Structure formats: structure tokens, C-alpha cells
Amino acid sequence: MIRICALLLLCGFTTIVSAQQFTITGTVKDTNGQPVPFASVYLKNTTTGTSANVDGKYSIKLKSGEQTLSFRAVGYKQQDHIINLSDDFALNVTLTSESYTLENVNIRANAEDPAFAIIRKAIKQRKVHLNEVKGFNCDVYIKGVQRLKGAPKKFFGQDIQKVLELDTNRRGIIYLSESQSRFSFRRPNDIHEEMISSKVAGRNNAFSFNKASDLVINFYDNYLMENKLSARGFISPIADNAMFYYKYKLLGENRENGELIHKIQVIPRRENDPVFRGIIYIIDDSWRIYNTDLYLTKNAGINFIDTLNINQQFTKVKDVYMPTNINFQFAGNVLGFKIAGYFVGVYSNYDIEPNFPKNFFNGEILKITEMVNKKDSAYWTNNRPVPLTEDEKVNYVKKDSVAKLKESKKYLDSLERENNKFGIGKLLLRGVSINDRYDKEYWHFDPVLRAIFYNTVEGFAIKYGVTYRKDFENRRSYSIRPELRYGFANQKLTGSLTGSYYYNPLKRASVGASFGNGIFDLNNLGSMTALGNTINSLIYEKNFPKYYEKTFANINTTRELATGLQGSASVDYSRNKSLANSSTFKFFDAKDREFTSNNPFTPTEEIPLFPVYNSFSASASLTYTVGQKYITRPDGKFYTESKYPRITVLYKKGFKNVLSSDVDYDFIKAEVYQDRIGLGLLGYTSFLVGAGKFVNNSKMYYPDFKHFSGNISTIFPPNIRKFQYLDFYQFSTNQQYFEAHLEHNFAGFFMNKIPLLRKAKLEEFIGGGYLSSPEKRNYKEFYFGIQRLVLRASYGFAYDGGRKLTQGFRISYGL
């Protein structure tokens, strides 16, 4: 019995020893003693490994016994080190520069560079390599660091050094985040990621927005990063049409891990094409990508930053090669802020033959649980695969301690005393906010100057409101807003109270109510902003918007019914009254122009458009986004932009005799909408198509009609739904309609070829709209223009059937 117990103890001890892990640390340097940033450190012939940090320091945990570590970095010769682990171990490595030679290559004068033949073979095998892995699982560690290398002293009156906690030279780390995840992929585009741990410097309760899918840059795709750094995307060096955009130069060949590797320089044929520059490494015979060291510049059309370097290293997994180290390094200068930084992703422990359970891929691309950000410093010390640099350590300690201080009531009270100071300038221009962040209560008083406006119905008027919001854990909140409106010409005081409760962020669920009375636009989609109408009325004697008075009560709710399917319902009661002009005041009297009446159909006479009437109605709608993807966090469900259309159906009914209601109608409509459909180098397209019908219109008045988003102003905020030349009121209908809008942005496809204009990064666009209803059977408009960021200028034409109605310039602003 004693022998058996001893044997069991010996086996248990042996198991413990064999399972024990030890830590290997060290620094990877080059032959000049300089650190090699982001070198790969992997257990040979496996995908178990890590990356060195930006200073070349690494740390890896391995089981005891004999191990072979491989050290790789793009531009350096791979080194293998055999070690016998029985304790923690220090191993510093010196990598020598790669020795790619042309010894076996004959290059004749005036002949095509041998690199072209290699690239043609890689292009021929592109689709094979793109699709050969049907799915995989792996572990992913991501670290992101953003630094300010310089900044202005003040920005919008704010002291940048204090606001961003920089040093006296206005330099420092402004963002530091780490995350660990389990990442799953299934072709063609199913992804699912579960975050295991997350840490954000200075935000103790925050969740990192790192996503492994954001780091996946697959050069086997023809186009990369569409609608990210550029609307058009960028052409891969081995795309099907790459030969039209690139030249290639063979820099040398070398054997690594028994494979012959070709080092090829990729060179743009034209300076300003959306292409990469740098080096790509191709494996002979299989023609796979082995490494990439490619970069983009402003000449390629990237926005927001000046340069982006993409460094990838691949490791053999069975018979294929998978990325194990992906590094993005960027730099730029925006409004005097010099930024630089990197995101590094370390992919390890691949399973390329996974057995995914049924419904594993259900649209949830990232799941973050409540415990993800609860890991303490001891956890990160033991599990962080990429060591922190010294300034990153200091940044964590400093910002995390400051964050704890900022959570205290004493600090928040002192901060609020400063921020909540009253000022006449603040009240006039920005409004006054009184915040209690400790109790999560927020008050905001509207800016006075924005509340003052003019129209011919009320004369000079003021609409002033105060918003109160109370926040709870996980983004639940409620808000209350009382609002008063007074017209000095018609001496009419109106007021309303609106409240909403956002009670379930995971279901995107809210309930709201409002009641009171007010002055409203006859077009429920709106016509012109209060400021725009004020300027047009006082200076040009043009009063485009028309108004009516409404006493109302409303209850509404919305909730997600299934992934991508949002349901909404509302009940409305109103008492509606026509209004007439009360003022003819203007700064300038246009001799050939007079204010029109408040009835859009009798511009020279103040005839009431409708009698006083009551309306009780209810509506319900469903909005479904095809292929909707989302991120789940404890504080909500966050949809990502879908590649497929959004479909909306709505039913609205006006009830006769309910609460003395005078209306009786039934309305149905359906819409299909999609924004930014990527078309590669040709830019992107957006469209909206809608149709509706009043299946019953027994008793209706003008405010209950179907209205359209029109525009007759030169300057207006853009919207794909908005017609650019259609009257606001003339063509509203109580029967049926069909409308369509289409716009295509070429994203600089033509402007980029004009030397004098390409630096302006202008984007050309064309578009059009169509409307058919009994009131306007065949309305069409076409326009074309250019845009830069949020400012657009266009010229267009509008037609009623074959008859031209108008033409002219339009300037729009905003996203």
C-alpha cells in the first residue's frame, strides 16, 4: 500500500513538473545594438508565441523541457534557439539583416524584371489562397497606442496640456489599450469574437473597442479598407488588375524554413493611384504571401493620417500559412496635432479545422461580458504577452490613479464647481450645463441666441428649453425636457413637456411621452431651419415655411424584436388649427417681392388651409436590416454598418370618433434604403426607394397627408431622402406615391487624375430623384457636383415630365 501511494505521489509530482510553466524574457536587437520592434517570438513549427514590444523586449511562457524558439522580423534573418527549460530564463537575441541575393537569377538589359513572372503566378493563385481555409479559431492579443508628438497650446480656448494630460512640450500617450480575445472565422465573411480581458488607461470601467476583425487585412482580396481610410479602398499588389497599377522589382531570394522566399518591391505606376508601396515576400512554388512590409501615403488618398505601414508575418499551420503578427503604424498632422502610434495584433493557437456549433455565427461579431474589464494588475502581469514599455507603464499608473481620483465625490464636486460656473457668454452662445457626475445628473439650458428666430406667423419669437437627464448603470437613462415658445407678433405662448426612458440597452428599448401645444411646420419632414428662414425672411423677404398650431399628446415605444429587426409603435392625439401671418417686418424691402400667405396654395390670400379639427391616430412600424452585425457589451447592443439594405414597413390609422376625432384614414408604406455600397475604385452608391398608399382616405386634412422632403433653398443640410428642387408643400398627397433617390460618389476617381486638383482631395458625385403621385406624376431631378469632407457644391436640373422646371446651384453642409 505504501509503495502504491509513493508511486501515485511520484506520478503526481512528475505531472506537476511537466505541466509547470517558466518565463523566458529578453530583448531582440540588430547587429548595431538597436532594438527590433515587434519581432515575432514563436515556438518553432507551432502558432504558440508572442511579439516583442516597440523596444524589442519580449516575454513568453513555456512548459518545462527542451524547446526551440524562432525569432523573426521582416527585414531580418530568422534565428532558432534551442533551450532546456527548468527555470525562468533570460535570452537576448541579435538578428542579422536578411541576405536576399540574386545569385540564381539572370537579369538581362531591357528585359522584364523577373518579379513580374512571380507576381503573375501569385495573382493566378490568389483565389485559391483566399478560399483555402474555410474557417479557424485563434487567440488574439491587441495593443493600441496613440501618441501626441506635438500640439498647439490652446484649441477652442482649451489648454491642451491640461486637457490631454501631456508633458510641458505637449507630448505624451493619449490612448493606451489592451485586449485578449478568442476569434473565430468562417468563410465567406462570418466572424465571432469573445473578449476575455480588456484594459484602457485612465478608464477603469471602460471596455476596449479593439476588434480582431479590424486588424484583418487580407492581401488576397482585390481591394482593401473600403470606406475606412478612403471611400475607394486600395488595390492589393496581387489583385487581379494589379499589373495595371504596379511595377515590380525582384530584390533577392533566400531560403527560410526550407522554403525559397522572393523579396519583391512594389512600385506604383502612377504617383497618385490608390496603391501600396514597399515590400512583399512570396514563397516559391506555392506563390503564397510570406511577409508584407507595405505602406500607404497621402498620395494614395488616405484621409486623416499621412502614412500607414502594414507589417504582417505568416506562419505555417499544417499546409497553409496564417498571419501571426500584424502591426499597423501610423503618423499624421491634423490641425496642428502631430499624432503617431501603432496597433499590434498577436494571433496564436490556431485551429484551422474547427467544428462550429449550430447558430454559432448569429450576427454577433464581438461579445464583451461584464467581467472583461475587472482583471487586476496581477492578472495582466502574468498574462500580458507583449511587455509594456517604460512610458506605457508610467502611463497606466498615472492615468489609472488619476481615474480613481476622478471617480471620488470630492474631485467631481470640485470639477463641477469649475465647469458649472455661470457666464453670460456661455448662456448666449453654447448654453449652460450644470452637471453632477457623481450622482449622474445633468442639466442643460439652451443657448439663448439659437433660441431666437423670426417668421411671418409669429414675428420675432423665442423657443427655449431645458433638458434634464439621469443616467444609471449600463447606459440606462431617462430624460425630461420642458419647452416654452412665444411669438411677439401673434402674442401666442405655447409649451410642451417631453420625457423618455431608455430602459434596456441590450434590446435598444425605450418608451416616451409628450404633451402640450406648439407651432409646427405643415410638412412633418421639415422644410427649412429656423435660422435659414430667419435670414430669408428678414433679408430677402422670402417666407418659405408654413405653420400651424397643434395641441397634442403622444405615447411611443421602440424595441428590438430580433437581431436587425426594430419595432416601433405610437399613439397620437392632436387638436389642429390653421394660422395666418402676423408680421410683415423685414430689414430690406424687395420691390419685386412680397411675403406670401401662410397657406401654400393661396399665396396672395390668408385663407385657412383647414378647419379646426381633432385627430386620434396610431402607427406601427418594423425596420429590418438584412445581415445586421452587432457588438454586445454590458452597457448595450451596438449595430455596425451593414453591407445590405434596410427595409421599413409602416401602417398608420386615423380613428373616427375616438376622443372626438374627425379623421378616418389608413396608410401603408414600404421603403428600402442602403448607404455607401462599395464599388471598388469607382467609389460608392447610396439609394432609397419608397412607395405608399392611403388605402382609406375617407376623412383627412392637410397635416395628415404624406409629405416629402423638399428644398428650394441654395444652402441646405444634405440627406439622401431630400429632393433638391422640389417645393415643400405643393405635392403632398392623400392617395399614393412612389419615390426614388440615387447618388453615386466617385471618391476622386476623376479628380485624382488632374494634377492641380488632386491635392485638394475633392470627390465628384452625381445623383437624382424621382417622384410620382397624383399631384406630381413624373417629377425628375438630376445633379452633379464635388465635395470635400462635409461641404458640397452641386448644379442640377428639375423636370416635370419632359418640361424643365428649374435649374441652379446648391450648397450643402454636414454629414
Image: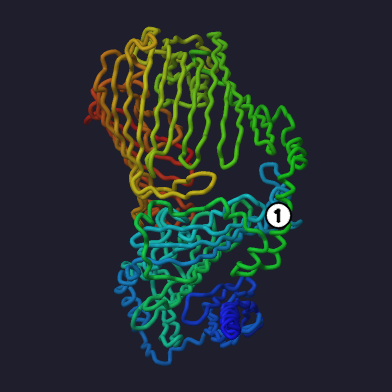
Q: Is residue 476 left or right of residue 421?
A: left
Asked which colour scheme the image uses, the reply is rainbow
Residue 521, by quadrant, is: top left
- Answer above or below: position of 163 versus 488: below
- Answer above or below: position of 489 versus 284: above
Which residue is at a point 39% across and 51% down the rendered structure image? 363
Residue 717 image point, x, y percent: 46, 34
- Name the residue type under label 1: Lys
Q: Which residue is mark 1?
A: 399
Residue 782 image point, x, y percent: 31, 38
- Answer above or below: position of 684 versus 79: above
Residue 215 visible at all: yes
The quadrant the N terminus occupies is bottom right
Where disc 1 sits, the SS reads helix
The residue lying toward the viewer, choosing from 554 and 726, is 554
Q: Is residue 354 left or right of residue 38?
A: left
- Sort mark 1 into few (<14), some (14-19) or many (20+) by Cα contacts within 10 Å: some
Residue 598 image point, x, y percent: 42, 13
- Answer above or below: position of 649 versus 291: above
Residue positioned most to the front = 1
Residue 95 visible at all: no
Residue 431, by quadrant, is: top right
Residue positioned most to the bottom = 103
Q: Is residue 711 left or right of residue 472?
A: left
